[in-house]
Image (spheres, rainbow, N blue to C red):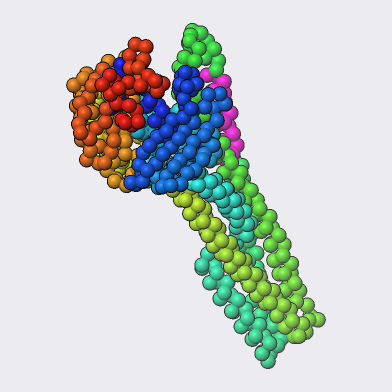
Amino acid sequence: MLFAANGSGKSPVVRMLASALGFPNNFRAEILERCNAVVLHAESGGKPLTIRRALETKNGQFYATIDFDDDQTEHHSEASFSGALFQLLGLKPPRLVSTKGEETKPYIATLLPLFYLIQGHGYSAAYRAPNSFIMDQFAEMVRFAFGLNPKHSFEVKKTLIEEKSALEAQTRKIVAAQRVLEYQSRGLDDSDSNQAALQLRCENLVQQIEGLRASVDTKGTASSTLSELLRQKEMQIRVRQLELFELQNRVAGIETIRAEIDGEVKTLSLNEEARGVFTSFQEICRVPNCGLFLGSSESYGKNLLYLKDQIKDLERNSQRAEIRAEQLKERLEELSAERQNLIESLESPSTSGIDELVTAVQALTMQLVDAQSELARILGLQEERSKLFKLERERDLIQDRIEGLTNTARGDHAFNDLRRKLRELTVKWMDMLDTTSVSRNVDIDLNLRFTFGGETLETIGSGGTSSTTSRLVLAIHAALLEAYLADKTRPFRFLILDTPKQDELHTADLARYLTELERMCEANDAQLLFSSTEYDHPTGKQDKRWLPAYRGPEKPMYLGKKSDLLSNGEGGRAPHDGA
């Protein structure tokens, strides 16, 4: 405990402690001119730790040394210093995302505000760091301190970018595969029944060809086969003609429906123009944007969009029907030519039995080739459909991975458990501080924003209740510390309270709060550093009282020349005795 009057130099001493741990050197010019460095003696894992931090006066360059376990390292940047201290404490800082979307890592100065409340503005917010350059910095520092996965991991972001690129590439593959599938499926019946019928047809055609070759009555068998082929050809022509007729009727019907929809679109447009004219009449709508026809405008937009979508669907159906009609016309011409050849072969008196046999075999072979080609197209279509299914399945897997990467915070059970624990502990410490007129319905979101009955700390503070804000901030940090100390292996086992606003807190409430903090720290091998101007908290055998030890012009001071050092009887314990 540091206890002295205002202006004795308590806050500079506490800030020097923070400075030795990596905080910026925010000191008055007098201190920067007369002090070269701040030296912190501590222990980590039972081994001595000494940190010496230079106090720069002009260029602001960082320089510090760390002596630990008979090994000294020098550091010329805050990043190097923080990395070495984290390593010494057995912590592995995560790769995080900065507010600019770039890779960054936490510093001691971004983590320390969880355990250090600086005088003044430190008691107005749950988290106040010298710089805020990490995305969702408060939540990330709590996650880091408690050994939880980061909310915005740079590795995750990098992986997310790669997965989104993979998703775009996969979507392009799917679109290409869909086009191939649509092209190959035009005019093709790939149903199981048609496939079975084609296979049976191929077998029958092979048998007929073999029968013709083995037949003794060549002319009779050939004539009979040609007659059967002619009958089949005429049947195929009738089926194709009927299908063409139905397609032509469908196209004509589509054009009729499209004309009707175009009429509805024109009617909607006329209604919208009429609405604009009515709106311009001041007798009807005196105030600009009066909203009288707002429902009509929204209805117009929705109906117009619906009708345009219908037109697009009709156009697509019409195009498919026209393509199929062209295919049917071409096929009808081929079938008519084949039919005519068969008629000529049957009716020509000069045609011999051999010629009829050759014609019959050629016709059967052509039908066999057509059937086999259609079967091959069906098999190719099935392969393309299987390929498309695999591509879509892979896209689903990529989307699942992206969803998993973007919803890590919602699926973080350990962090959600911590939030629930902090809610309970915050209410406990609010009661310890006798925090009145604030709801005990505490909620903590994924960014660790505390709300009390829906009110944030900023809202409560802006209402002129700064005393309540201080109590809430103290309660939040006590809750954080209690939850943190539950794990005996965590290294930052201290809480630094630099002169709480005692004019805003009742002495009895502050005493009760500090006493409970002392008990918690004693039970969990932790330390409490408290500086005070008015409230002299009682100390026990395990405590240290650090009083100002240098003679000042009006009162004892914490910093001074050796010649001004007071005896133990005049002032307090010297810094090197009480530090």
Where the N terminus falls, by quadrant?
A: top left
Residue 205 percent location from the top left of the image: 62, 78
Residue 280 at least partly seen: yes
Residue 87 percent location from the top left of the image: 44, 46
Closer to the camera, 470 or 462? 470
Residue 220 higher or lower than 373, as above or below: below
Residue 230 higher or lower than 222, as above or below: above
**Relative side of 182 to 571, left or right:** right
Q: How many discs appear?
A: 0
Residue at 49% over, 31% down = 54
Residue 381 higher or lower than 32, as above or below: below
Residue 421 percent location from the top left of the image: 27, 39
Residue at 31% over, 39% down = 493
Chain part drawn in magenta: 257-275
Asked if the magenta segment contains residue 27, the reply would be no
Closer to the camera, 404 or 340? 404
Residue at 39% over, 20% down = 563
